[in-house]
Image: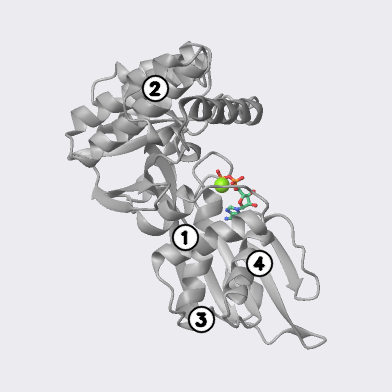
């Protein structure tokens, strides 16, 4: 199916936005800290057309997702879409609340971003939708405002209490650039990827079953640690030795956050690919030993990656307790390294999957 087949005429405009992966700065965002995501090659494309459709004089939108092969009609009188429609409708609604008039729309979505794998297909959908709307209606909004509207849509319409990292990465980064973001001040800097390096992301095949309870517990521990140390957030501690005043396990939790923030700040000073890799390895050790959010499968996968020639560094990415690992590898080597590592990972009894670079994309290239 394409736009023409679904809606009977060609689209007026289209826009795309990428998914993202966080390279460094894990479990730092809710501590007001620093993150370092980059865009992945897979993206979401949104095509838009004007629809003359109205119901009782109220605007009516039609959304079609190629990935779900599903069409949803939303009228303004029926304000509670669920599922994928809530992300698109949320983008329309936040723009209307900001004073822009949005006409009845036909929206066609297609995406190569894996859904629900931690590569932020949700932010890619929101940012692509908002970019397409900006183009169609000549809206005077910049890329940071796009990220902010996208975050509002996800929080208020999709019901996900997210920070702003995903949307900022999708809106401001590309596959050749990483985004340094201070989650407290929103100060940011777009930097090139380290020299001669590319990104590899492998799903561990282990679902993140304990992620929600573990995440909430870590958040609470960080808040308690910050209170005990008399600071607003752990971001305000820069010397890891200060955390030794805390009782266990708060001491180790706080030490992860402080050292992780310092690792991100070191990258901001400019580092080689080798050093970037060492910082990723140190991040994994800290997430495993101090933050205790890794699991055996992730440790196995990361160790296999770390000992493979051509890998600068590797670590778990996302909240942990399962999910994916990210590695920084020699440019052009990601596919071969992944095939080699997945073979050994299989011998260890696990079933992993390459997420980045995607098979289709590299075959097409
Ligand atoms: P992630 O952002 O890590 O991929 P989320 O659970 O936050 O996982 O977002 C996934 C949801 O976003 C999907 O279940 C769907 O509702 C929506 N979504 C993302 N991409 C698409 C798409 N191409 N078509 C329809 N819905 C999509
Ligand atoms: Mg998401």
Callout 2: 10 Å neighbours few (<14), some, many (20+)? many
Give the CA separation, mark 1 to mark 4.
16 Å
In this rendering, the label closer to the viewer, 4 or 3? 4
Q: Does label 1 or label 4 sit earlier along the sequence?
A: 4
Q: Position of residue 100 (x, y in %)?
A: 57, 80
x 45%, y 34%: residue:
231
**142 in relation to 166, above or below:** below
Q: Position of residue 76 (x, y in %)?
A: 75, 76
Q: Which residue is mark 4?
A: 89
Q: Position of residue 135 (x, y in %)?
A: 45, 77
x 26%, y 28%: residue:
277
Callout 3: 10 Å neighbours few (<14), some, many (20+)? few
Mark 4 CB in 8 Å range of ligand 1?
A: no
Relative side of 171 to 192, left or right: right
Is residue 312 shown to the viewer in this render?
Answer: no
Callout 4: 10 Å neighbours few (<14), some, many (20+)? many
Q: Does label 3 or label 2 sit earlier along the sequence?
A: 3
Q: Position of residue 146 (x, y in %)?
A: 47, 65
Is residue 136 shown to the viewer in this render?
Answer: yes
Task: Give whichever of 285, 301 is nearer the camera.
Answer: 285
Q: Which residue is mark 1?
A: 147
x 80%, y 70%: residue:
78
Task: Give whichever of 326, 26 is nearer the camera.
Answer: 26
Task: Give whichever of 275, 10 is nearer the camera.
Answer: 275
- Element at badge 3? loop
Relative side of 279 to 210, left or right: left
- Element at badge 4? helix
Whether pointer 3 and pointer 2 mark residues with C-beta atoms closer than 8 Å, the reply is no
Whether pointer 4 and pointer 2 mark residues with C-beta atoms closer than 8 Å, the reply is no
Q: Which residue is mark 2?
A: 284
């Amino acid at each position: 199916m394409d736009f023409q087949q679904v809606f009977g005429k060609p689209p007026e405009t289209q826009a795309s936005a990428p998914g993202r992966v966080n390279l460094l700065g894990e479990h730092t965002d809710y501590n007001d800290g620093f993150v370092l995501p980059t865009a992945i090659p897979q993206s979401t494309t949104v095509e838009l057309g004007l629809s003359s459709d109205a119901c009782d004089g109220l605007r009516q939108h039609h959304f079609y997702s190629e990935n779900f092969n599903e069409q949803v009609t939303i009228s303004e009188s029926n304000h509670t879409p669920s599922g994928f429609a809530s992300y698109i409708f949320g983008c329309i609604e936040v723009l209307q609340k900001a004073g822009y008039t949005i006409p009845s729309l036909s929206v066609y979505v297609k995406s190569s971003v894996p859904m629900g794998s931690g590569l932020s297909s949700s932010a890619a959908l929101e940012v692509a939708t908002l970019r397409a709307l900006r183009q169609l209606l000549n809206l005077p909004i910049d890329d940071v405002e796009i990220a902010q509207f996208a975050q509002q849509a996800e929080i208020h319409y999709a019901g996900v209490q997210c920070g702003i990292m995903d949307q900022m990465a999708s809106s401001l980064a590309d596959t050749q650039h990483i985004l340094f973001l201070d989650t407290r001040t929103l100060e940011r800097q777009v930097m090139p990827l380290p020299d001669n390096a590319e990104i590899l992301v492998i799903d561990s095949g282990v679902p993140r079953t304990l992620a929600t309870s573990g995440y909430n517990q870590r958040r609470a521990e960080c808040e308690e640690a910050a209170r005990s140390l008399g600071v607003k957030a752990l971001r305000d501690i820069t010397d890891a030795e200060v955390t030794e005043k805390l009782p266990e396990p708060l001491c180790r939790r706080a030490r992860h956050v402080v050292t992780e923030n310092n690792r991100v700040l070191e990258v901001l000073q400019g580092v080689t690919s080798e050093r970037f890799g060492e910082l990723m390895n140190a991040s994994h050790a800290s997430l495993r030993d101090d933050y205790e959010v890794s699991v055996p499968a992730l440790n196995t996968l990361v160790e296999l990656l770390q000992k493979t020639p051509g890998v600068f560094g590797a670590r778990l990415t996302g909240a942990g307790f399962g999910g994916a690992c990210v590695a920084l590898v020699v440019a052009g080597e990601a596919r071969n390294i992944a095939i080699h590592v997945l073979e050994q990972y299989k011998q260890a009894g696990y079933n992993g999957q390459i997420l980045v670079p995607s098979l289709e994309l590299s075959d097409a290239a």
